Image (tube, coloured by chain):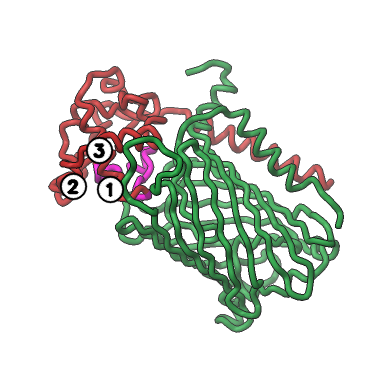
Chain colours: A red, B green
Amino acid sequence: MKILLPAGLSALLLIGLCFLCSAQSKPEKTEPASVYSELEKAPAKFRAKANPLLKDKDAAAAGKVLFEEHCAECHGENAMGSKKAPSLRAKEVQEVPPGTLFWILTNGIVRKGMPVWSKLPEPQRWQLVSYVQSLGPAETTENKAPAKP
Amino acid sequence: MSLSPLPHLHLLLLGTLLSLTGTGLLVAQENPYIVAYDHNLEEPGNLEVEYFSTFGTQRGGPNFHAFWSEFEYGATAWWTTELYLSGQTTFGDSTVFTGYRWENRVRPLKNEHWINPVLYVEFEDINGADKILKEVVGHDVESDFLTPNGEARREKKREAELKLILSSNYKGWNFTENTIAEKNLTNSPWEFGYALGASRALTLKGAAQKCNFCLQHFIAGVEMYGGLGDRYHFGLHETSHYLAPGLVWNLPSGWTFKIEPTVGLNDNSHQFLLRWGASYEIAGFAQKVSQLFKGKSE
């Protein structure tokens, strides 16, 4: 009986995990047009914010390291997107004010799977913005039909 | 003292799980708290496997080593679910499995605010020999741990625990306040407790090169926690309280190490606890498992 309880619990945990994993792996049905629509929700106060690290020559390099550590898993190593998250090289992302990207990083898009990154200190979030916007636009298949934002 | 393989089994289980899942680079950004929670949830689809130890001194009885494993999964960006398995060794007595806990943390607000609430619900099925001190509530005091394991483990505790976590990130600092309400599901009164924490990375900017020892990977902080009595005797009378400075090292490889020397603040508290833990974050765990079951790569 003492062995049965932990064994049963482990089995339950495994079944639960499989259930959660299958739910996780199903892409949400999102209209392609709305993938980048969250960018438009950034408040004017944030849109107007300038990147304080604009003159920091190391900002983009540090942002690249942070991107590889925290973002590449979903957005792809070169930020071109994956099945989990859209490309950050799309012009919708590249052309917004840096404050908009900072706002998205700070708040996430929690209901659509993008975590909140406020746990990264502000300077690191700006370094990420510097890196992403240093990449420049590029056309990808994910831009046209992404799974979810 | 009877030797038991339980602590080694915990580590073996963690090792096996890690070796099965392969690596996906994702650096955890953990705060140094062991008792208090902040509002940062697990990234969706990631599994964090953790092992923690608490060595505790005991007046009037033998010292102890309590240990637990945690499996923390990001079900969505707003919901994290976690399973704990715990045990303890009381020196000169025995080693026992003390039960499991299942917790869920939900973030009700979609945006970041000055104060960010997280709702926490936990079910515990533990026995009276549990010594992990994952929370301190009610009139929990040091002398509760004097009961020999053989007797203490016969006491069954099925408890519900609710927490309101209020946490803020401000200029690189994290401040968190947890209010705890716990109830044994038998006819026992609600018990209350608290946990407070503050922490900050040693530097706020990221380095331009990958490095293990950069100051950005170290976060120092302090937490304080204790009991607040129960429904009938609310307050500080007959309660225990602890103060714990801590340091966490979040390695770029996905490993995290925490250490937290803890001192008891009154005569009802253990005089000293040494707590430490190691964890590994498996990025894209959900995807890896679903690929295993599908038998093909996506």
Q: Secondary structure at mark 2?
A: loop
The residue lying toward the viewer, choosing from B67 and A106, is: B67
Secondary element under disc 1, as helix, strand or loop, is helix
Between the residue at mark 3 and the residue at mark 1, the CA separation in whole angstroms equals 12 Å
- Residue B97 image offset from top left, x and y in percent: 76, 52
Does B100 sit left or right of A4 as displayed? Answer: left
The residue range painted magenta reads: A102-119
Residue at 31 percent across and 33 percent down: it is: A64
Q: Which quadrant of the figure has residue A124?
A: top left
Indicate the chain on which mark 2 is placed: A
Residue A103 lies in the magenta stretch: yes
Amino acid type for the residue under numbered disc 2: Pro
Where in the figure is residue A13, as x and y percent of width and height? 64, 40
* Of pointers 3 and 1, the one earlier in the residue sequence: 3
Q: Kindly identify which residue carries mark 2.
A: A52
Asked which quadrant contains residue A145, the reply is top left
